[in-house]
Image (cartoon, rainbow, N blue to C red):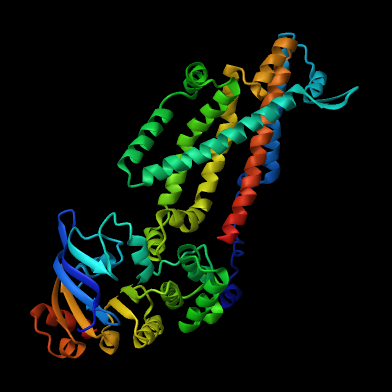
Amino acid sequence: MTKTPVISARNLDKFYGEFHALKNLSIDVAEGERVVICGPSGSGKSTLIRCFNALEYHQSGQLIVDGIEVYEGSNEIIRLRQNVGMVFQQFNLFPHLTVLENLMIGPLKVRRVSKADAEATARRYLDRVHIPDQADKYPRQLSGGQQQRVAIARSLCMESKIILFDEPTSALDPEMINEVLDVMVELAEDGMTMVCVTHEMGFARKIADRMVFMDDGEIVEVADPETFFTAPRSERCRDFLEKVLHH
Amino acid sequence: MAGLSKSLAAPQPPAPELRRPPFLRRLTRSTGFSILVYAVVLAAIGYASYAGAARMGYNWQWYNIPRYLYRFTDDGFQLGELTLGLVMSIYLCVTSFAIAFVLGLVIALLRLSDLIIGKWLAVCLLEFLRNIPLLVLVYLFYYVLGPIFGWDRLTAGILCLGVFYAALISEILRAGILATPKGQWEAARSIGMTRGQAYRYIIIPQAWPLMLPPLTGEVIQLIKSSAIVSVIAVAELTTIGRNLISDTYMSFEIWFTVALIYLAVTLAISLVVTALEKRVSHNA
């Protein structure tokens, strides 16, 4: 990697009570890079990316995201989150707002852009996730796949530099997974910096610059997709791939 | 179908119709019956009071009541004492509810905050207010805090009710806020909202419909409790009623009237809020 990292994690440790969720973990993500993190459940993948936008805080080590050091009590967290979008497994759209309002509320209230600009941006991104005609509906009127695409558009509307995906397709019915993945592939092709936690290995293979395998709070293996899928070095990674790929 | 050939072969008992509930149950569940029961109970109460009053030789003067509600004098239309008392009661309730709501919100947010001191302060205040009788609190506000801060009886009454109900309302607000899924918080924070913005634009609008029914309960409770400030002689409905009785000795008529006025106000509020709830749930 020659580019400067936009996410730089050094020796992160995190505990939930006695449970050691992240163990002395280090990783860099470069600008424009697409990193896919996989691993068995409980391995700390979600915890790691939730640390990246300060939804969780690590307890020791150093984490710098987009030039801002992340620590509990920092008064730059709000600025950090404006540049780091997140897409959740459960979509977490705001149910009392229409699709358009869901997309506009961040730019309006946080970035304080004008209403006309916010709406133009919102419509542009709705177009980009292929649901321009759902603008005035409420989230509960949409299918899961559509809701997740709205959630992606909501992140895009904040003009984030980095988008974190926390198992974006795990809560979807199988027939809706591809419509969400397609949007993510398009994003990747446009050069967005992405960190995805996902079990969709076909997708990972298509877009990842780097694959990361985590287990038990540690990064076990980092490799380019080709090597990762054809010649994984560690036993644990081979076991895991065996299970996910043959399903 | 199969039943047809069978019935040709041998006479069958007629298929039972969809069974109607027994006569008695149909009767007791009908609206007419409910109204009848209601009327009978009311008549019984009315008769019992009349009979009792007659036995004690009570002199009913219902015809004297309307002039305490309104009267026409040489100066034209005037509100009667009871109506003025009601206006004062409403003023008392509206102002103390406003105080209770704002203070309740502050207490709720303090309890939900990360500030240890704030949490402790809120919990102490809450336990203190919830665990002493309202009557004692009224005395405390009027006889102790009143002279210290120079409050008149009305101010003391309003503040007392406001603070007492703030404790109850804060619990309702807190429960409503806690009922909002955690993911909503995370989504709000992840698009860079501050805690205050998340409350204002995301959490409160969703929690509001949940809070409305129990809040109505508290408003009605507040209206009823407002009668207690008559012990410090704030000129509200109950105090006026008591004063009128000591002037006129019409205790039966006046207490009945006062009770009906409270009933009318609280029922009206219930109806309005029920309509409001329907609208809120349609929009949500």
Left or right: A156 in relation to B211: left
Left or right: A174 in relation to B228: left
Residue B75: give x, y in percent of width and height: 88, 24
Depicted B212 relative to depicted A211: above or below:
above
Left or right: A230 in relation to A123: left
- Foreground: B244 or A174? B244
- Foreground: A149 or B253? A149
Residue A203: give x, y in percent of width and height: 30, 86
Picture quarter with the N terminus of chain B: bottom right
Left or right: A108 in relation to B31: left
Q: Could one spot residue A38 in this view of the protein? A: no
- Exactly how many numbered labels are in the figure? 0
Q: Quadrant of residue B41?
A: top right
**Residue projecting furthest to the right:** B74
Q: Could one spot residue B76 in this view of the protein? A: yes
Depicted A166 relative to depicted A74: above or below:
below
Residue B38: give x, y in percent of width and height: 68, 35
Residue B98: give x, y in percent of width and height: 56, 38
Residue at 12% from the left image edge and 89% from the top image edge? A231
Picture quarter with the C terminus of chain B: bottom right
Q: Quadrant of residue B18?
A: bottom right
- Foreground: B53 or A154? A154
Residue at 21% from the left image edge and 60% from the top image edge? A58
